[in-house]
Each structure stands twice: as structure tokens, then as C-alpha cells.
Amino acid sequence: MLSREEFVNTIVELLRKAETELEEDVLDAIRSAEKKESGVAKLILQSILRNVEIAREKRVPMCQDTGIPVIFLEVGREAELNFDIYEASKEAVAKATELVPLRPNAVHPLTRENSGNNTGINVPVVHCRVVEGDEIRVAVMPKGAGSENVSKQMMLLPGDAMRIEDFVVDAVREAKGKPCPPVFVGVGIGGTFDESAVLAKRALLRDVRKMNEFERNILEKVNELGIGPMGLGGKITALAVLVEIAHCHTASLPLAVNIQCWANRRAFAVLKA
Amino acid sequence: MKTGYVSGDINDTADKKDEEIKARRIDVKGNCRIFAKLKVREVVYLTGTLVTARDKAHMRAVRLLKEGRKEEIPEELFEYPIYHCGPLLKGEKIISAGPTTSARMNPYAPALLRETSCPVIIGKGGMCEEVLKLLSDRGCYLTFPGGAGALAAESIKCVKRVYWEDLGMAEAVYVLEVENFGPCIVTADSRGRKV
């Protein structure tokens, strides 16, 4: 049986890892962009790569906006748990805030009062689903505000599938330099209003080097925008476009675009339960 | 209260690390003229004093100005480069301190700039025309690579003073002593040119 302590410590370590190290697929994407750019755009990407190195060596968060923690859980239906995973996730985030440390970012949405430890009403955000097996798969994604603030959602008409590409490109165009480009673009198509947004975020967990033709086509259009690193112009505005889909009501076509900064911070673990 | 300009001297014209881009090192001291001389796409590394301010500090400063309580505003905000940044601290030490999105400060920056001689704003994403116009009379707007918090923290030698800690870690005003803080890219200059 998985102990609460082991679960909590795993989340703390995953948060530390996500904040201080980039996964190889994300690094590959930034490195290859650096080779393609020149001038100021190249200098920015070199600074970003140097920053990632310093963060890993010194074990400090690569960005001061350590984000709002989003936790994805896939709980095997045979897994034995004798604790509340939502409460344990909350405890882990509070602990990580002190240990990593994380900047206290969580505030009450109306009073703007800061809770001081990145937890609060319905925070951390935990997306949980039950799957086959006896393992618990954990992914954490600290999400910064710069990129989250320019994310977009739209309920398209059922016959508007051809508008999807333009909507995604427009979202990146309007965002300009704000989300710290080059960005990763998570897209959720279908499902319901809420599910499309979760799909868009979940897409960002995928290996960013593996895109299908549909995704590569949108990426090409996004990069024609010429926004470039930090919005100062360049060939690379986005490093990947990642699309997840779900069946939806015959009368609707939900669409969500979750923009992620170059620091597509996430970390994964599999726990035996 | 001191309201004189902050000086700067160009003391290096080439950065050996980057062959394609010429970078300048600037000492931020007592006269702002140097920032007005910079041109768009130039790259600079700053040494001297910077002062951080983001959303809540701007709101408070503007409120105090309106209420005629100017003397309660941190004096450094009147004469040193303003850095849009909400740092991450471990104890007393800043460990990550990249820029935050400057556009959020658009509604507050004009009132503050009109009352100060702040020579330059450092942030990311650029600012509105009104702010850039006010800045162009005295200096320029600099972009620091977004998200490069660990890199920025490397060049922070110490925190000289902290104001308004009640606003929280990210929103307090920190007076920083920096060395070779950069790369800072000129993205709006005194002639109204911008990237």
C-alpha cells in the first residue's frame, strides 16, 4: 500500500524537479530553435539555455514565477489508498513552497489575499482519473501566469472546424511577447466547455518532439507570424503545437488554446500502490 | 528627497561571448543621459542599483501620489531604473528574479513617471505608447529575457533595502545591487523607435 508520506514526498520532489530542470524533449526543442535563429533572437535563446544550466546546477527555480501547481493523477483501480489524495496534494504543495522553495502565488480571487503557501480553495488544481492497473501515475506542471493569461477558449459552431487553425494562430498573434515565446501551444478540441481546457493543458504533458501532420501544419502557420523569442522578431514563435481531442455534442465544437512559455515545466513519476 | 538623474558610463563596447551582437556595459550611477543615447536592438549589461516594482507597488505609489503623500514612496523609485520583477527568495537571498509582464503596469506607470526621473524601465513584453513617450524624454525601455530568473539572480550581488514587505514576497519593493545584469535589449529608444 502506498503511504501518504511517500505520496507527499514524491509530489514535493516532482515539483522541485519541474522547477529546476527541463525535460530533454523541451531542451531539445529550445536548442534546435537556438541554431535556427540569429542576432537578438539567438542571444535570447542562448540566455534561456544558460539560465536552464544555472538553475539545474544550483538547484534553484529557473523562473521566479514558480506558477500555480497543477497535478495530474492516473490512479489504477487496483491501487490501495488509505488517505485523501487531494489533502495530501495540498500538504505536498505547502511543503514544496518551503523546501524548493516556491514563490507564494496563490491568492483569493476577489480579496487578492495571499495564502502564503500556494494552496487555497480548490488549489492545487488536481486532475484525477481512474485507470486500469495498480499503479499511480503522477505528473506535475507548475503553470506561470504570463502564459496562462493569454490562453483562450471558444465554443465554435459545429460546422466551424475550418476555423480551428485560425483561432489557434490568432491566440498566439494576440499574445505577442507576453507569454515568453517561443511558446508551446496546447490545443483541446471537443469534449465540453471544461473538458476542452483540460485537454489543452494535458496536451502540454506530451513529448513535444512528436507532432502529427495536423499539429505541424498549425506550427508552421504560427511560426509565419514572426513574433520570435520574447516578441522581438524571429523565425521561431512556437516550439510545438500539441492537440488532444474528445468526442463532443453534435451541436457544439468546444476549442481551447493553452499557451505555455518556453519553460514547459513538468515532471513525472509512477508509484506502486 | 533626492530626485537627480542616475548617471551611466559606457566602459566597454564589445562582448567577447557573442560575436554577432555588440554589447555595452553600463554603470548605473548618477546621470540618466546614457539610456537616452541607446538605440533599439542594442544590448546592455547593467552594474549598479535597480529597484523592483510590480502591480501592487505601482498601485500603492500612485495612490500615495494622489493623496499628496509622496514622501512615503521609496526614494529609489524616483531615480533608479525600475525593474518589473517579483523575485523568489530563499530566506533573505534572491534565488530567481526574471522580469514580469510590463504591460500590466501600463495604467499606473504614467502617473509615477511624471513625478520621477526614473531613467529606464526594465521588463518584458513592452509597454503602451503613453509610457514609452514619457520614457523617451529621458531614456528607454529594456527587455530582459523572460523566464531567465536564475540567470538574473546570478547578477544580483545583494538586496540593499526592502520596502513594503506587507505586499508579499512577489509584490514588495527591493533595492538591488547588480553586476553585469543582462542581457538587456533596448526595445524602445529615446527617438521613439521600437522593436
Image: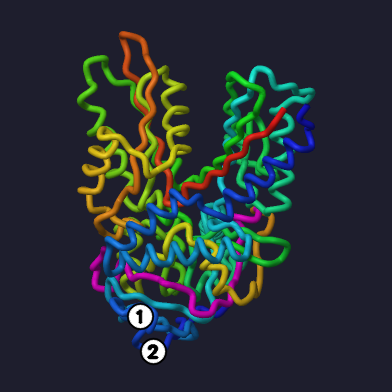
Residue bearing mark 1? B23
What is the magenta range? B168-195
- Left or right of A243 in this view: A20: right
Counting residues from the start of the chain, the first of labels 1 and 2 encountered is 2
Occupied quadrant, residue B92: bottom right
Can residue B57 be seen here? The reply is no
The image quarter containing residue A36 is bottom left
Residue B67: give x, y in percent of width and height: 56, 57
Identify the residue at image location x=35%, y=24%: A189
Residue underneath mark 2: B12
Let me know if marks 1 and 2 both belong to one chain: yes
Mark 2 belongs to which amino acid?
Asp
Q: Chain of mark 2?
A: B
State left or right for residue A271 relative to residue A263: right
Residue at 32% over, 57% down? A33
- Toward the viewer: A68 or B63? A68
SS assignment at label 2: strand
Residue B28 vertical position relative to residue A215 in the rendered view, above or below: below
Where does the image place residue A236, in percent across and percent down from the top left? 28, 54
> The N terminus of chain A is located in which quarter?
top right
Determine the residue positioned at 65% across, 56% down. Answer: B169
Residue B191: within the magenta?
A: yes
Mark 2 and mark 1 in contact (Cβ < 8 Å)? yes
Q: Is residue A162 magenta?
A: no
Measure how far apart labels 1 and 2 are at the Cα level. 8 Å
